[in-house]
Image: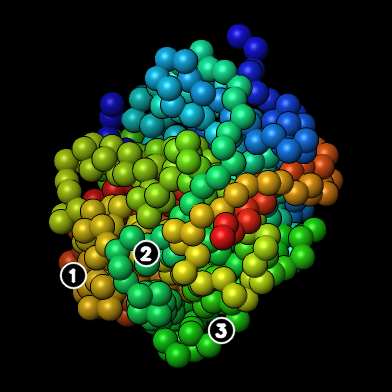
Amino acid sequence: MEYKLTYSKYKEALMSGKFCGLKCNKCGGYTVPPKKVCMECSSEDMDVVELSARGEIKTYTVIRVPPEGFDAPYIVSMVELDEGPWVMGNIVDLDPDKASMELIGKRVSIGHKAVKGDKFSAGDGVALAFKLEG
Amino acid sequence: MREVAVVGVGMTQFGMSEKTQIEMFSEAAMDAITESNIEPRDIQALFLGNGLGDFEEGQMNLAPMCAADIGMPNVPATRFEGACASATVAMRNACLWVASGFYDIVLTGGTEKAMAMGTPMATRTFAMGSDSRYEGFAGITFPGAFGMAAHLYSKKYGIPLQKLKEQMAMVAVKNHKNGVLNPKAQFRKEITVEKVLSGVVIADPLQLLDCCPFSDGAAALVFASVDKAKELTKKPIYIAGVGQGSAGPLYTQKDFTRIRARESAVKQSYMQAGVGPKDIDLCELHDCFTIAEILATEGLGFFEFGKGSQAVEEGKTSLNGEIPINPSGGLKAKGHPIGATGAAQAYEIVKQLREECGERQVKGAKIGMIDTLGGDLATVCNMIFRR
């Protein structure tokens, strides 16, 4: 069966403001970012759905020594989506020097930011951009 | 399955090296071969760990070149890549091929020249262990992943971050103290908790001395069937158990204070060896970051989940503690040439079980373990050795 939500389609949707994932028709679980089969029950019977694009910060770090091609400092965080899965992205509306343990548990809305690729990245990419709510 | 034993080991000095990956591996390999009382022509296959040779020296397909350099150009020679666990994955395969009866004597180990890349490029290539599509564009780094693990740990177990950071610093202090006693270690200098806590921040909350260095180095071991081993050496060290586990990208692992790949691997190792954590006399484990050592001591079952940081503070993991962890100095002080790391851990355990470790000898050690982690907690491979 054809790969339902490829990176290329996921990226295209995200760049147009739609954060998409897969919802399983068998168990109801969500698989985000997409995989070939449901992360909960291994079924291939999943549909592409637009997600709520909201979630809660579970952890974070401030990258101060970046990989080649990135400008530090910046915040990387793991967010638990309202649909259940965890995703990685950047908290974009906070000064990295103000990041603290207080962030954990805070609600975020999820957008995107385009990221320039390098010679190893097979083109340009996109990262999830987290904005603190309220 | 036949029982397999280590008959010879070799290891280079770790740190910055002028030598190539091949030259370093050849030095370690010939020491292991000489110690095994065999010739290169007696070896039937090479199982080589290497992480980033392509980027370090522009060298792909390294294994046949390593084999040719030590006079065994025609044997099957294969590179194994499991990020920082590459050598242990190679050793596990070497062990299983001998155990299966297909080979009697094989060479295994690993080599790496990470310092050639410089920090920005090394950070970029190490980060290739993350999911390049769904994580890499966020600029995650290897210290960043473990920084996030430290924050998760602090929150989950209600240990104030400053307290946890002090306990993490004690891991670095302990491993540097052990490293002073290891002539092959990259750093042979004691440090203090205050020094760790005053270092530059690499990825919050990890400071410079919470992190292992980039390193060059190689290590090698000769494995043989037990019958052969008894002919070759008076001091065979037996491989009692091996295990390997995987996990997907970091985001699929959710609460990664529990490293599922490790829990899966170590269950296999303990089951095959017929032992449990209480039977292990010493362990060389993957302290790429101070928090990583704490998580590993819990995942391997030495301490309850959430109690590993306290155990360090209580001295339980010191050279003379209840379970000495990283007597070699660990990745932190001995160094971390990624593709060689697991083989260097095995080198230390074999030396310890033969009672050849001088001042850092764990007295009376009979059963030792290694544990190596690769990528964003996606590969863990461990092995149990006994004398």
Q: Do marks 1 and 3 share a chain?
A: yes
Quarter of the rendering occupied by the C terminus of chain A = bottom right
Task: Inspect the image, locate mark 1, and give the three-letter code of the amino acid beneath it.
Answer: Glu
**Left or right side of A113 for B368:** left
Gap between marks 2 and 3 measured at Cα: 23 Å
- Residue at (30, 68) in percent of width and height: B158
Quarter of the rendering occupied by the N terminus of chain A = top right
Number of the label disc, if any, that sits on residue B199 = 3
User: Few, some or many C-alpha atoms within 10 Å of disc 3 (few <14, some 14-19, many ≥20)?
Assistant: few
User: Few, some or many C-alpha atoms within 10 Å of disc 1 (few <14, some 14-19, many ≥20)?
Assistant: some
In this rendered view, identify the residue nearer to me: B332 or B251. Answer: B251
Gap between marks 2 and 1 measured at Cα: 28 Å
Observer able to see residue B288: no
Gap between marks 1 and 3 measured at Cα: 30 Å
Q: Residue B239, located in which quarter of the rendered image?
A: top left
Coloring applied to the structure: rainbow
- Residue at (57, 18) in percent of width and height: A47
Task: Inspect the image, locate mark 2, and give the three-letter code of the amino acid beneath it.
Answer: Lys
Up-down relation of residue B27 to residue B172 (above or below): above
* SS for callout 3: loop
Q: Chain of mark 2?
A: B
Coordinates of residue B189 in the picture (x, y in percent): 49, 86
Q: Earlier in the sequence, mark 2 or mark 1?
A: 2
Coordinates of residue A45 in the picture (x, y in percent): 51, 13
Task: Inspect the image, locate mark 3, and give the three-letter code of the amino acid beneath it.
Answer: Gly
Q: Residue B296, located in which quarter of the rendered image?
A: bottom left
Residue named by callout 2: B155
**Left or right side of B351 for B218:** right
Coordinates of residue B32 in the picture (x, y in percent): 47, 53
Residue named by callout 1: B322
* SS for callout 2: helix
Q: Do marks 2 and 1 share a chain?
A: yes
